[in-house]
Amino acid sequence: MKKFALSLVAMGLALTQPVLADDKAIVDGYFKELKAPAVNIAEHLWDWAETGFHEEKSSELMQQTLKDAGFTVQSGVAGMPTAFIASYGNTGPVIGILAEMDALPGLSQDAVPEHSPIEGKQAGHACGHHLFAGGSVTAAMAVKRWLEETGTPGQIRLYGTPAEEGGSGKVYMVREGLFKDVDTVFHWHAGPVNTADASSSLANKTAKFRFKGIAAHAAAMPERGRSALDAVEAMDYMVNMMREHVPSDTRIHYVITNGGQAPNVVPEFAEVYYYMRTPRAADLDELWTRLENTAKAAALGTGTEASWEIVSGVWDILPNVTLAKVMHDSMSEFGGIQYSADEQKFADEIRPTLGKQAQKMVGMEKMILPFSDEVKAGIASSDVGDVSWNVPTAGVLTATWVPGTAFHSWQAVASGGTSIGHKGMILAAETIALSAIKLYEDPALIEKAKEEFGQRKGDVEYYPQLGDRSPALDLR
């Protein structure tokens, strides 16, 4: 891939498109020119596939693109070198747009319809954050241009948020007070369908549990040793027994990150990395205390010492139907995605790898799913949740992957590296831009969203699940 061009002028983007007759047409016109920088960002981030808190080149490209477009950029915010805020405007409502950038370790894949890891590459954008970045950055650029052309009072702010995958980057930005003056927030995500329904997510807390034992020769003098690995296994056994006695929608998963170095040495150190999820953050504390108690019990029973480090923690998403409806109406104006002949060929070739369910979803990329006022339950976790408990927030999914594709799969990496992913990204960017314009034109929608936010939040007091810890910059 060619070295990226940081200057919009160098890319031939003077942004001189004339204002058209209506907002949808205006946004369409903007993206005749903004598609190029969106794809430029997406392709380079896909190629670099930088993991959480290591998104140096990705963040630099996003920031420079925004600087060239006339934004004021504040880098390294909230103690995270790759986090940034790009701002335009001094008066009027403040609308924030979220952008993610991190890839997932262990999911290297070429942009082809068969499983084909790229040699020497360890990570891949299996959650589509490269598209998230390109789409959100250019959506902010489109809104800025509209504000300039119309003279409408308004402020647009792009949040470059690192390490969504297990690092909770947005939580540190919330904790730092960087959303305090924001009126509403928009976000989006890569996905297999086009939908703007208001939905929640699972609150999530993670920690690395570490056990310290005593090393000894495993055959000659095992009685002298105390196995840290035994403690890990004892904890895992108790947690697996606990699963029967937690709410059915609670999710607990773990990996043993260190189990010792040699079988003939009683392991002096061992570590297990746990995730716990539940629909409401308010219910997470009691369950988490029980998890910590299994670590204490495991240490007591094996004669070892237990400690743990909270790595991340996020709230469930507080939905906002008012904003979700604005986004649905905006996305519906643009319509679904049409595949070219080559894109259809790619979809036909990758679909047999997606399972039987995918056969029922053929052609769904062309559809905008009907809107429902009923809030959908969450199935995954995101640090967008913490933003949503502080600012009225809404987002969309667009079909950046062949319908039926699973999140965090090689197929997601593959589709996201093609023009299929780019088309979904542009639909999301246009949806966000048009939605923001509608709020600037009708501030009563902002007030309605704030009223709903207050009603849904009630008397719940937000606090960061990860406490006062510093960003886990060594996460990966």
Image (spheres, helix red, strand yellow):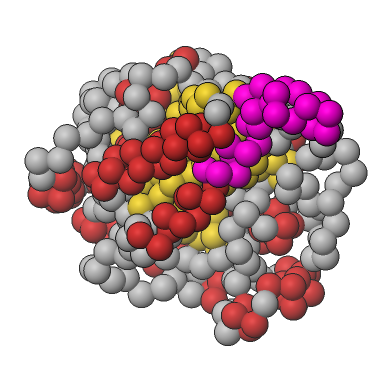
The x and y percentages for residue 319 are 27, 53
Q: Residue furthest right?
A: 119
Up the image or down, 263 lies above or below 420; here it is: above
Q: Along the line of sight, which residue is nearer the eye, 442 or 282?
A: 282
Up the image or down, 403 lies above or below 115; here it is: below
Report the span colored magenta. 213-235
Residue depicted at x 51% and y 32%:
299
Q: Quadrant of residue 476?
A: top right
The x and y percentages for residue 8 are 63, 29
Residue depicted at x 17% and y 35%:
461
Circle count: 0
Up the image or down, 403 lies above or below 20; here it is: below
Quarter of the image where the N terminus is located: top right
Residue depicted at x 48% and y 75%:
367
Going by the image, does 435 lie left or right of 460? right
Residue depicted at x 50% and y 55%:
240
Going by the image, does 50 lie left or right of 282? right
The answer to if 221 sits in the magenta stretch is yes
Going by the image, does 353 lie left or right of 358? right
Up the image or down, 31 lies above or below 353; here it is: above
The answer to if 146 sits in the magenta stretch is no
The x and y percentages for residue 266 are 74, 30
- Residue 98 visible to the viewer: no
- Residue 302 visible to the viewer: yes
Going by the image, does 224 lie left or right of 466? right
The x and y percentages for residue 396 are 42, 56
